Every structure is written in C-alpha cells, then in structure tokens.
Amino acid sequence: MNKYVEKVINDAKVKYADQPEFVQTVEEVLLSVSPVIDAHPEYEKVDLLGRMIEPERMFKFRVVWNDDEGVAHTNVGYRCQFNGAIGPYKGGLRFQKNVNESIIKFLGFEQTFKNALTGLPIGGGKGGADFDPVGKSDDEIMRFCQSYMSALYRYIGPDVDVPAGDMGVGGREIGYLFGQYRRLKGVWENGVLTGKGLTYGGSLIRPEATGYGAIFYLNEVLSQQGDTIRGKNIAVTGFGNVAWGVMKKASQLGGKVTYMSGPKCYIRDPEGINTDEKLNFVLDLRRRNEVDLKSYADKFGCEYHANEKFWGVSDVDVYMPCATQNEVGMEEAKKIVESGVKYYIEVSNMPTTNEALAYLRQNGLIIAPSKAVNAGGVGVSALEMSQNSERLVWTEEEVEARLQSMMVNIYRSSLNAAQRYGLGYDLIAGANIAGFEKVAQAMMEQGVF
C-alpha cells in the first residue's frame, strides 16, 4: 500500500472513529486507488486525498413539524455538499430513522465517484433526515417536507446543488419539496430537484432508472463471460423502486427475479416476478408502506419465509442486493460462497462490508460494485436536468437508449482502468480508479482550496 494512502486511512480511522460507514467507504476507495497515487507523487504535496475525503461543506439543521393531532415533533436534517469539482452537487435525500452524519457522509463520498463515472458534469452530494415516513399520513409527510425545504432552500439551486430522491423519498416527497421551494423562492426553477412528476419537469423512466441500469451493467458482465441474461434467475433484496426496476427490465430481457426480501422476511416465486399484475402489486406494497411480503405470497401462492434471509439459496444465478448498506457481512458472505452462485452484483450503496467483500473476492465470485452498477439512477437524473434546461421532454426510448449507452461506457471505463494498472478483471478497483482519476484531475487543475 502507498504510504500516503496508508496515512490518510489511518488518520480517518482516528478522526472519524464515531462514523463507521464513512470510514469503511474511505478505506475501500483509497485502497483501490493506491496504484494511482504511486503514479502521481505530486498528489501528496497538495494533500489531494486529505482534501478529497473532507466534504466541501456539511449542513445539519433542525426540522420541526406537526402531526395530524397538532403535536410538534423535531428531527435532524442533513445536506452534505461533498465535492463540486466537476459540476453542481448532485445526490439524493434519504428519509429514514437510522440516518446520521456518518451515513450521509459515506453516501456523499460514494456519490462523488459514481457521478464522475457517468461522464456527465455533476459533483457529489447527499442529504436526508432521521424522519421515518412509514406510518405517517400524506399530510404529515407534506408538513415534514415543507419544514425540511424551508431550512435547505437557501443552499441549493440548478447550478449549485440538485437533490433527488432516495430511500423514503419518492415522487410524493419530491413534489412536496418542490412546491415548498417554489413558494419560498417565487421562481420556476424546476432544475433544482430531480425525480419530479412528469407534469412539472420529470423524466420518463426515472423511477425505473437505477434498476434498469443495473440490468444493463449485468448484461455487460455476462457478455464478458460469454453468457446472457436469458433464462437467468435473480435474487434481490428490497422491493422499492430499485428492485422493482431490476424485476421489470430483467423480465423484458428474458430473465426473472425469483427471490425478493423485506426487512425480516423473503418470498420465493419460482415463476418469477415478471407479469404486470405482480410488478404493480410490488408498487402497491411500497405505496402502502408495507414492510412485510406475506400479502404477496398469499395473493400469488408462493413461499413465504418469516424472520429469515435468503442468502445461501442455490437455485438462482445472480445475487443483487438492492436494499441498504452493510446487509451482507461475513455470515452472509460464507453462505453465498457455499451456494455456488457465480455472480454478485451490488446495486444498493455499499451493501457489503469490506471484510465480506474481500471474502467473496478471495473465493472467486464475479463482483460488480454498487457505485458503477447503480449509477444509472443519477445518470437519468442528470438527463432530467438537461431536459429542464432545454425545456424539452425526451421520449422513453430516447432516455432508455442514453441510459444503456451510459452503463456500457461505465462498464468499459471501469474495466479499462483496472487493466491499465495491471489489476486484471477487477471491476471494483476499476470503478474506483476511473471515478477518482476524473475528480482528481479537476481538483488539481482548479488549484488548492
């Protein structure tokens, strides 16, 4: 390991000992780019890595809202504008009760390199709040969103910072946030948020984009192995927009999702979640904020497993974690290896602990990293920004074609970066290097600040 890289990692472990998610992703990225630092000793002189792991600015603010009984509640809101070297900050908002500074910072750091991989001029950012929308009424969610935006609106804009949705923030929440932004600013800046409804500047296939992009990336991985998605069975965690997009595009291309999990359960549907009725039912589960999948199993007559995870099943060809960070640790990784499944495609942000990821790599699995695989979501968000700036609405076919081309380019740039540094078929290191090189060059050209 490069000594400068080692020093920055060790300093981060001490300085951010209370931020484990952030330290985990810093270590994973910097270890991957160590060969780049060897080739560029000038980076240490300007402390490029030290600057790169520090957000340009981080906001923390109070969010007060009233429930339907008139009782006031107080939550904590965040916005991390991590790196704007290649464009305005861009990244989602996450409303989830476990949100904290460490999670927001790790997501912002990951977003910086993910956005660079898209080839589009967007920097990295992330935000959210420790607010849980589950069980809340529409009016309660509206009041929370309005309060959140009242604190944030001064610091965002189409050329400054463009938030989007993430876990707990879908089209409903984006609508409430945009309405409050418009009310406060008194201007029509629909490019300030992405993931909007089609009636006020949204892009076609944005809800499906991350899942579609993941399948396009999987296609490239399979093709390199002389394989195809046709006939493949896939296991996904989660059943939000990302997993739903995976289900939808996989079925269109001849594959099928046969396992789907919730927080404390999973279902096995050997026929596949591949009909309009089933796909629409999955959407309804999310709209109702259900966290259990028994209603799906009852309706479609398939297996339901309570208080279990599906890791270790061998009747699938591809594992695709789509839910949340660190859902695969060493226990799950050992089961995955024992199952004999060949392909492990990360879709959610950092779903695998560093220890588990190292174990999967040592045991020969073909792994695709989340910052490359899930970049299609932010890529289509950037395409939405382009449509907003030009006052255009592209067709579904045009957006999808651009998305597919983007994912092919991300795969190839990751593969080329790994091979350029003699790392072989290492898509994890390749994605980190490809994103890092673009951000590093922009930072060097703009001087030390």
Image (cartoon, rainbow, N blue to C red):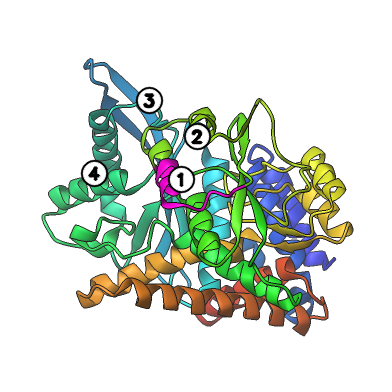
Asked if the residue under mark 1 is in contact with the one under mark 3, i.e. CB atoms within 8 Å, the reply is no
Q: Residues within 10 Å of mark 2 (few under 14, many from 20)?
A: some
Q: Locate the N terminus by quadrant.
A: bottom right
Foreground pick, 342 / 32: 342
Query: Distance from label 4 to label 1 (Cα)?
Result: 29 Å
Residue reaching furthest to the left = 186
Give coordinates of residue 298: x percent, y percent.
51, 29
Magenta-colored segment: predominant secondary structure: helix
How far is disc 2 from disc 3 in space, using C-alphas?
A: 20 Å
Measure the alpha-carbon separation of dots 3 and 1: 24 Å
Question: Which residue is under mark 1?
Answer: 278
Viewer-nearest residue: 247 or 390: 247
How far from the left and from the top, in percent, is residue 63?
Answer: 33, 33
Percent of width and height locating residue 378: 45, 63
Range of the magenta residues? 271-283
Q: Residue at x 38, y 69 (%)?
A: 382
Mark 2 or 1, nearer chain start: 1
Residue matched to label 3: 135
Residue annotated with mark 2: 296
Amino acid of disc 1: Lys
Above or below, 346 relative to 131: below
| N-term-proximal mark, 2 vs 3 | 3
Q: Earlier in the sequence, mark 3 or mark 1?
A: 3
Q: Nearer the viewer, residue 69 or 10?
A: 69
Compute the Cα span from label 4 to label 3. 18 Å
User: In the rendering, at what x and y percent does residue 416 appear?
Assistant: 70, 82
Q: Which residue is mark 4?
A: 176
274 w.r.t. 14: above or below: below
